[in-house]
Image (cartoon, rainbow, N blue to C red):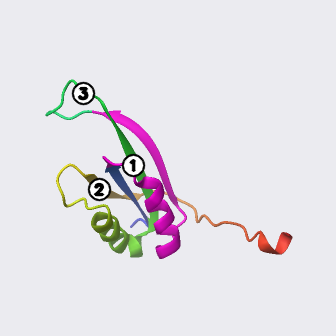
Amino acid sequence: MSRYKLITCILTKPVAIEMITRLKEEKGIITANTTHARGTSSKSEYMMKAEEILTVLVDASEADDIFYFLYSELELDQPHQGMIYQEAVAKSTKYSLPDLSSSV
């Protein structure tokens, strides 16, 4: 069984940076990333649209809680807000930020 889960959100509004900040401040998560992509749907076949992609790597034990937090806070239960999914990660290493306060 995988020790980590990757949660991916495809968002239609530019809110990923704000959500990364909230994940750090409210949940202590520092393993998140955002990128952009362009895409279209079957309902708008001629109009390409920019989307934000938010990925969050979490320990499997907290994955369901973080998934629900993102789902709720990003209002993904509402139409045209985006989508979310999670998957097991085959291999990962623990990431931590160095304590720079002692070196100053």
Disc 2 residue crowd, few under 14, some 14–19, many 20+, Cα 10 Å:
some
| Residue sitting at x 20%, y 49% | 80
The tag earlier along the polypeptide, 3 or 2, is 3
Q: Amino acid at mark 3?
A: Met
Determine which residue is flagged by label 2.
84
| Residue sitting at x 48%, y 55% | 17
Magenta span has 17?
Answer: yes
Are discs 1 and 2 less than 8 Å apart at CB? no
Decide if residue 34 is in sight here: yes
Q: Farthest residue in the top direction? A: 46
Where is residue 19? Give x, y as percent: 43, 61
Magenta span has 32?
Answer: yes
Judge by depth and name the residue closer to the eye, 92 or 43: 43
Q: Is residue 71 above or below residue 15?
A: below
Decide if residue 28 is in sight here: no
| Residue sitting at x 21%, y 23% | 46
Q: Is residue 21 above or below residue 55?
A: below
Q: Which mark is residue 14?
A: 1
Residue stretch in magenta: 11-39
Disc 3 residue crowd, few under 14, some 14–19, many 20+, Cα 10 Å:
few
Determine which residue is flagged by label 3.
47
Q: Amino acid at mark 2?
A: Ile
Where is residue 25? Give x, y as percent: 52, 72
- In the picture, measured across the screen, residue 52 lies left or right of residue 103, that is left
Q: In the structure shown, which secondary structural element does the residue marked by tag 1 occupy? A: loop
Q: Amino acid at mark 1?
A: Pro
Where is residue 5? Give x, y as percent: 40, 63
Q: In the structure shown, which secondary structural element does the residue marked by tag 2 occupy? A: strand
Judge by depth and name the residue closer to the eye, 78 or 97: 78
